[in-house]
Amino acid sequence: MSSLMVPLLLPVEGLPLAVTRSPSTSLHDPVELSLGLIGYDPSYRVIFCRTCQYALVPNTIAAHLASERHLDDVTRQQRTHHVRFAALKGPMSAELVQKTQIAPDTSPIPYLALYSDGIACTLCEGDNPYVCRARTTMRQHLKTAHSWRGCAKPGRPTKASLARGDSVFIGQATREPVYCQTFHKGNFVRYFEVAPPGSQPRGASRA
């Protein structure tokens, strides 16, 4: 899928900037402002790293660019320009990004990593269920958020019953696999379901 690159000048020291319009079938239809390694999506108000494929927490951008993984990618001067670029955009805080509501039929956001092993909770109300990528994590969610105990019998379960429980008991309250993404990693990770690649989504919703 091709993109249209339109040259633009950043108001700081005339730094070259590129505007990328990526063809999209969703209502999101992002216009990405790119300065080499990082980009800005005004639709979700996030600064993202193209190489790492996730959004950067605003106050960690300088440290991220100076990390070992990017030592050969940008010079010190380029890092300064990247940080200024990010500051001009005024990205949304990670706490608010976590609360962004993404409809499950939204097409995958192109600059974020896409996972095909997601697990969605069917007990959550509304259009944005809890999503994770591990059954142990989902079991904890079901227990904490829904006081869910499945069909477990009293007493200490055997290893065999626990193994069956993963596929039977968890399956009663979940839907898997689903495609999912997350804006941030680490402390601010929050997976959300997206439409399978190549499908015809209806669009995104916003909090």
Image (tube, helix red, strand yellow):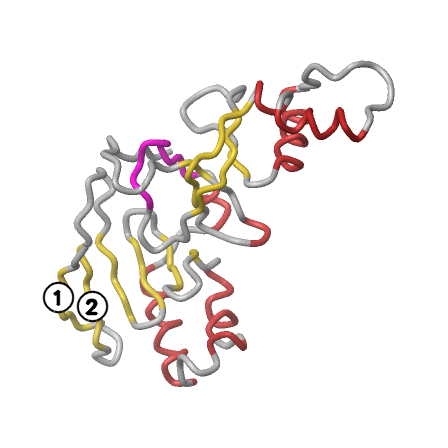
Q: Secondary structure at mark 1?
A: strand
Question: Label 1: how many residues lie within 10 Å, few (<14), some (14-19) or many (20+)?
Answer: few
Q: Position of residue 189 (x, y in %)?
A: 53, 47
The part of the image, by quadrant, that contains residue 194 is top left
The answer to the question of whether label 1 and label 2 lie on touching residues, with beta carbons closer than 8 A, is: yes
Q: Position of residue 158 (x, y in %)?
A: 82, 26
Viewer-side residue, 85 vs 111 = 111
Q: Position of residue 17 (x, y in %)?
A: 22, 71
Question: Label 2: how many residues lie within 10 Å, few (<14), some (14-19) or many (20+)?
Answer: some
Q: Which region shows up in magenta?
A: 100-108
Considering every residue shown, the one lying at the far front of the view is 160
- Amino acid type shown at disc 2: Ala
Quarter of the image where the N terminus is located: bottom left
The part of the image, by quadrant, that contains residue 7 is bottom left
Viewer-side residue, 163 vs 135 = 163
Reading the image, the residue beneath label 2 is 18
Asked if the stretch drawn in magenta spans residue 169, the answer is: no
